[in-house]
């Protein structure tokens, strides 16, 4: 495993892998992703608020219909009783009784009218709320769509760059000897992406620590040569 070509190619491969790592990191950490997340959370909250408001508005409308219907019937009844009273021909006792009943119905109807008015006001306020939340939701959704488009655009640029690097990588990988490539792939995740370094002036290109002359002679026996300190592959 000591063909020099293989090691130089491995250094090239690492360079490309590091560039790909950097691009993928850039892809994951676009500031727009945070904006999108905030907009998405906001739109989820508003969608729930909108649903709740609509549901309360429906309940309110049903209650209003019911109370209005009751009021209509009660008013009809009141009208009938009043007509009977005005028509006369009743005994004094019946007239008193009917007058009392008309008064009672009047009071009851006034109460129902009050409730109907209250419900109408409530319904108005819920309708206003529903309109507000619908507008706010639409605004957030619009902002979210804008950010989403920016993210897609940025991602497309990054993905195209990564694709180019992958093509170059595919050219280099076959040039690296199999076992060396395996070792490189095993080391990379545990060494911040740097599995191989050049040994220059006795200093490891990976950990930047110096190796004494004796240490250099010792490690040179390794196949592949690896740093005594960080165990990275060294290109001499
Ligand atoms: Zn080292």
Image: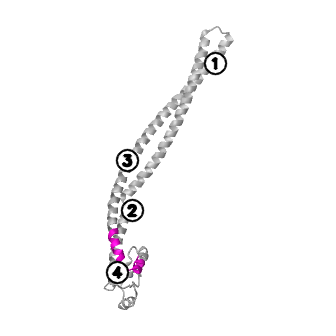
Residue 111 in sight here: no
Q: Nearer the viewer, residue 233 or 115?
A: 233
Which SS class for mark 4?
Answer: helix
| Magenta span: chief secondary structure | helix
- How far apart in space, not on screen, are marks 2 and 3 (Cα)? 23 Å
- Of badges 1 and 2, nearer the viewer stands 2
- How far apart in space, not on screen, are marks 3 and 1 (Cα)? 60 Å
Scheme by which the image is coloured: one colour
Residue 145, how many percent across, how many down?
37, 50
Residue at image mark 3: 142
Residue at the location (40% across, 54% down)? 36
Residue at the location (43% across, 38% down)? 131
**Which quadrant holds the C terminus?**
bottom left
Q: Is residue 50 magenta?
A: no
Q: Which residues are magenta?
A: 166-184
Which SS class for mark 3?
Answer: helix
Q: Is residue 172 magenta?
A: yes
Q: Residues within 10 Å of mark 3 (few under 14, many from 20)?
A: few
Residue at image mark 4: 6
Q: Is residue 160 left or right of residue 90?
A: left
Reply above or below: 222 against 113: below
Sequence-wise first label, 1 or 4: 4
Mark 2 sits near ligand 1, with its Cβ under 8 Å away: no
Residue at image mark 2: 28
Q: Is residue 106 left or right of residue 181?
A: right
Q: Is residue 9 left or right of residue 84?
A: left
Residue 177, how many percent across, how many down?
38, 80
Sequence-wise first label, 2 or 4: 4
Q: Nearer the viewer, residue 232 or 184?
A: 184
**Which quadrant holds the N terminus?**
bottom left
Which SS class for mark 1?
Answer: helix
């Amino acid at each position: 495993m000591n063909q020099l070509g293989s090691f130089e190619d491995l250094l090239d491969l690492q360079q490309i892998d590091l560039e790909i790592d950097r691009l993928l990191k850039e892809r994951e950490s676009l500031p727009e992703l945070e904006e999108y997340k905030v907009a998405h959370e906001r739109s989820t909250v508003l969608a729930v608020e909108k649903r709740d408001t609509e549901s309360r508005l429906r309940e309110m409308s049903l209650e209003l219909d019911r109370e209005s219907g009751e009021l209509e019937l009660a008013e009809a009844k009141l009208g009938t009783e009043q007509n009977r009273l005005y028509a006369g021909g009743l005994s004094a006792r019946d007239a008193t009784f009917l007058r009392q009943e008309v008064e009672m119905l009047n009071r009851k109807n006034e109460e129902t009218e009050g409730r109907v008015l209250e419900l109408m006001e409530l319904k108005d306020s819920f309708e206003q709320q529903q309109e507000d939340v619908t507008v706010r939701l639409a605004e957030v959704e619009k902002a979210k769509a804008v950010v989403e488009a920016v993210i897609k655009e940025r991602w497309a640029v990054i993905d195209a760059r990564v694709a180019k690097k992958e093509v170059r990588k595919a050219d280099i990988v076959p040039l690296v000897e199999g076992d060396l490539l395996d070792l490189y792939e095993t080391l990379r995740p545990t060494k911040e992406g740097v599995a191989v370094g050049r040994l220059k002036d006795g200093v490891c290109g990976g950990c930047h620590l110096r190796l004494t002359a004796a240490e250099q002679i010792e490690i040179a026996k390794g196949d592949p040569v690896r740093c005594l300190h960080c165990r990275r592959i060294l290109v001499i």
